[in-house]
Image: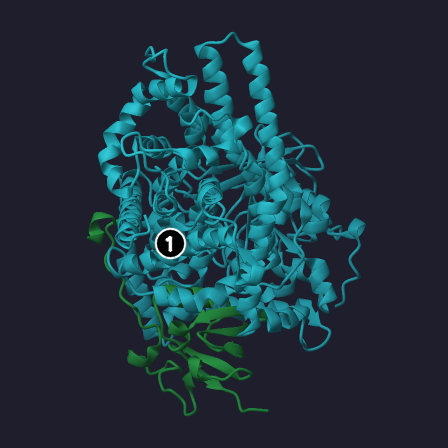
Chain colours: A cyan, B green
Amino acid sequence: MASPPLAAGDLGARHPGSIGGGGSSAAPTAAPARPLRVALVGNPNTGKTTLFNALTGLRQRVGNFAGVTVERHEGRFRTPDGHAALLLDLPGSYSLSAGSPDEAIALEVLIGRGRDVPLPDVVVVVADAQHLERNLFLASQVLELGLPVVVALNQFDAATAAGITIDVPELIHELGVAVVPTVAKRGEGIEALRRAIAQAPALPADGRRFALPEAAESALAPVAARLEDAGLPPSAARMEALRLLGVAHPEAHLADVAELPALLARARAAIADAGLVPERLEAELRYGWIGGVLARCVTRRAPRGRTATDRVDAVVLHRVWGPAIFVALMALVFQSIFTWATPLQDAIEGGMTWLGGRVGALLPPGDLNSLVVDGVIAGVGGVLVFLPQIALLFLFIGFLEDSGYMARAAFLMDGLMRRVGLHGKSFIPMLSGYACAVPGIMAARTVENEKDRLATIMVVPLMSCSARLPVYALLIGAFVPPVAVLGGALTLQGVTMLGMYFLGTVTALGVAALFKRTLLRGPARPMILELPQYRWPSAKSLAIGVYGRASLFVRRAGTVILALSIVLWAMATYPKTTPDASLPEAAQQEQQLERSFLGRVGHAIEPAVRPLGYDWKIGVSIAASFAAREVFVSTMGTIYGVGSEGEAALPDRLRAERDPETGRATYTPLVAIGLMVFYVYALMCISTMAVTVREAGGGRVGWRWAGVQFAYMLALAWGAAFVVYQGGRLLGWG
Amino acid sequence: MLSLFARRSRPARPLTVVSADASSSATDPAAATPPGACPLAACAPGARATVLALCCGHQEACRLRALGFSEGTQVDVVDARHAMLLDVRGTRLALGRALTAGITVQPHAAG
C-alpha cells in the first residue's frame, strides 16, 4: 500500500497512459489544428494558482469572462510532444454548486454553458494531497461530467511530511483517470502533468456513474432528460440532476430550462416518499464513496497530534495576542510600504524630472513643449510614482493570502464586522482598500451574499488609499508642526496622519452599517470560512502576481491617466490670454490660469467651496482632481508656479498665501484640516468608479450604484469639511 | 428601494428548513431528536460531536455539505467565541454563531 518516497524524476511516471483499460496510450499523432483547451479546477488553498503559474510561467494574461466581472486567467504551454495548450484557470470552488459569482463560472464552463468559453478538452482537477477527503468531493463531481480528467495531487511533499501515504496506482485505479503527484511550488511533477494532459484526450472518458438508490434514480430521470434536452451532455445532465437536489435555486444559466423547478420539486417529493432526504443525497453518496476510496488508497502514520499550524494558531488566534499581532502586522506593512518605497519613488521622480528636462530642451518652446513636459510627462509621472507602493502592497497582500494568514485576519475581525452587519470576509477587501480601492473592490467577490458584497464595495473607497497620501503629506507638512507627542514616541504630524486613516476606517464601518440597515437590508449571512494550513508562499507565484498587478497599473497610467493629463493641461492652458505685462512672472502665470477654462471652472464652483473656507484656487485643484485625487498636489504646484524641482517650496508658498481682499492667510491650519477631511471622504478616482460600475453588476445597475457611491461620498466630504471649518471658527480656532 | 437596484428580479429567498424536524418524514433518522443532542454552539472547546441536522439557510447547508460538514460527520470543537473553530474531515473551518446555533449535534462522551 505504501508508495515510494517522492522523487522529482519519478513523479507521475507510473503508467499514466494505461488507465482506462481499452484506451490507446499512444499520444495523438496528427497535430491538432487548434491548441488543446485545458481547464484547471480545484478547491481554494490547494496551490492551484501556483500550479497554473508553474505550468505557464509568464505566458499568461488576465481578462474577464464575458458579461461578468470574474477575472479570467489564461496561459499557454507546450505539451512534451510539442502541442500547444491553452490553460484556463477557473475560480477556486469547493463544489460545483455555486455560492458566489466566481464559482458559477466554473460550473458553466464545465457543463458547456460558458458564454464565450467552449467545452474544455481536458479538465485538470487540483487536489490537495493533505486534504484528499474534502478535495475528492469536487473531483467526484467533475469525474461524472464525461470529460477527460487528470488529477494533480498537489502539495504531495507536505502530505508525506505529515505522515500521509497515498497509494497513487491504487488511486488511479479507483478514479479511473491519470493521477499525477505534484509539488507546484518547486516545479516537481509539472512535466509529468503536461504529459498526462497531452495523453488524456485519447483515453476513453465515459463519465463515472455513481450508483443511486433505485427510487432516486427513477425520480431524477425526468430532470436529467430535461437537462439533456437543454443541451447538456448526457453524463453532465445526470450529475446536474443529483446536484440540483441540494441547491435552493438552479443557477442563473439554467434559468431558461423549462419547468426545471417544478420537475425538481417532483423529484424531491418522490425521493422523500422513499424515505430519503433529497438535500442530503448528494453529500451522503459522494462522501460515502470517498470514504471507501480513502480506506483503500491512503494510510496515516499516526493520529494527528498538534501540527505546526496548531501551534501558530494558538498564538495568532489568541484572544489577546491575536488582535495585538494583527495590529502590529498591519502597522509593519504600512510602515514598510512608506519606507521601502521611498527610494524607488525618488528614483522614478528623478527619472521623470530628468526626462522632462531633456525633452523640454529638445523641443522648441511653445505649446507642444508645454503639452509634452507639463501635461504628459508630469501627469503620467505623477501617477507612476505610486508604482513602488502599489507593487509592495500587492506583495504583502499576496504573502498574507498565500501563507494562510488572511483567513485568520478575517476570523479575528468577524466579531467587529458582525456588529456592522457584515462578516469577517468583508474585512479583506477593506484592508486592501488601504492600498488602492480598485483591487479592494475586486476582492469583494469572495463575499458570497450579493447585498453584503455591495455594502462592502460601497465603503471600500472610504479606506484611505495610497493616492491620498500625497495630499495628506503636503498639507500636514505645511501646517502641522512636528511637535513630539506621547513622550516622543510619535510626532503630531504622524498622529494627524494616523487620525486621517482612522477617520476613514471608522466611517467605512459606520456607513456599511447604515447601508445594511437601509438600501441593502437583509440578514447577515453567517460566516463559513476555511482556515488553510500555513505554508511558505512560492516566490515565483508571488512575483508573477505582483508583476500582473503592476503591469495593469502601468497600462492604466498609459491610457486613462494619460488622456486625463492632456485634457487637464489643455484646460489650464487655453484659451490663451495676454496677461498684464507689468506684473511679475508668477502673477502673470496666475492670471493666465485664472482666465483659462480650468480657472473658470474654479470660479464657477467657488460658491460651493466658500463655506468650507476655500478660494477659487483650491476650487480649481479640487475640480482638477475629481478624476484622480493625487492630481491635487500637481495642480497646486502648477497654480503656485512651483516646478517639480522646487517641491519643497510649495508648503512655504501655501503658508505665505494671502487673501487679496482681506489680507488674511488663505490657508489656516483649520482650512488644511478641513481639506484633508474632505479628501478622506471624497471619491475622486475615475478608476474606482469604473471598477464599481463593473463589480456592482455592470450596465445600468452598475452605473446606478457607482452614482450612489459617488454622491454619498461627496455629500459626506462636503458636510464633514463644512462642520470642521465652521465649527472650528465658532470655537475661535480659525 | 432595493428593487430599483436589484440585478435580476428574484423572489425573496426564504430560509429553508433543511432539518427534518418540521417534516413528516418519519423514516428520517434526524426526525426524532435523540436525548443528549444539542446545538453545536453549546459545545465547549475540546468537545467532539456528530452532526445530526443542519438547520440553516439552504445555501449555507449546501456549502457546508460540500465542505464535508454533512449529517453523520464527526467534528472537533477547537475554539468557541463569536465564531467557532472546528476540525472537520481533516480541515479547519470557522463558522459564524448564527450557523452553529442551528446545527444539531450529538456530543460524544468526554474522555
Q: Going by the picture, which residue comes out furthest to the front?
A: A663
Q: Going by the picture, which residue comes out furthest to the top?
A: A364
Residue A44 in the image: x percent, y percent? Answer: 54, 56
Give, as a three-letter code, the residue at label 1: Thr
All told, the count of numbered labels is 1
Residue at 70 percent across and 46 percent down: it is A190
Residue density around tag 1, few if under 14, some if 14–19, many if 20 or more, within 10 Å:
many
Residue at 39 percent across and 19 percent down: it is A589
Task: Give the left or right position of residue A140, taking residue A307 as reference.
Answer: left
* Mark 1, secondary structure of its residue: helix
Residue A91 in the image: x percent, y percent? Answer: 50, 49
Residue at 64 percent across and 43 percent down: it is A543
Q: Is residue A632 above or below residue A9?
A: above
Residue A697 in the image: x percent, y percent? Answer: 33, 44
* Closer-to-camera residue (B39/A126): B39
Q: Would residue A202 be seen by someone viewing this image from the given angle?
A: no
* Closer-to-camera residue (A589/A289): A589
Q: Which residue is mark 1?
A: A456
Task: Give the left or right position of residue A511, taking residue B50 as reference.
Answer: left
Chain of the residue that carries numbered disc 1 in the rendered image: A
Instruction: Give the quarter of the image for residue B103.
Output: bottom left
* Closer-to-camera residue (A466/A18): A466
Instruction: Give the quarter of the image for residue A64.
Output: top left
Residue A294 in the image: x percent, y percent? Answer: 63, 68
Q: Would residue A672 be seen by someone viewing this image from the given angle?
A: yes
What quarter of the picture does the N terminus of chain A occupy? bottom right
Residue at 42 percent across and 58 percent down: it is A426
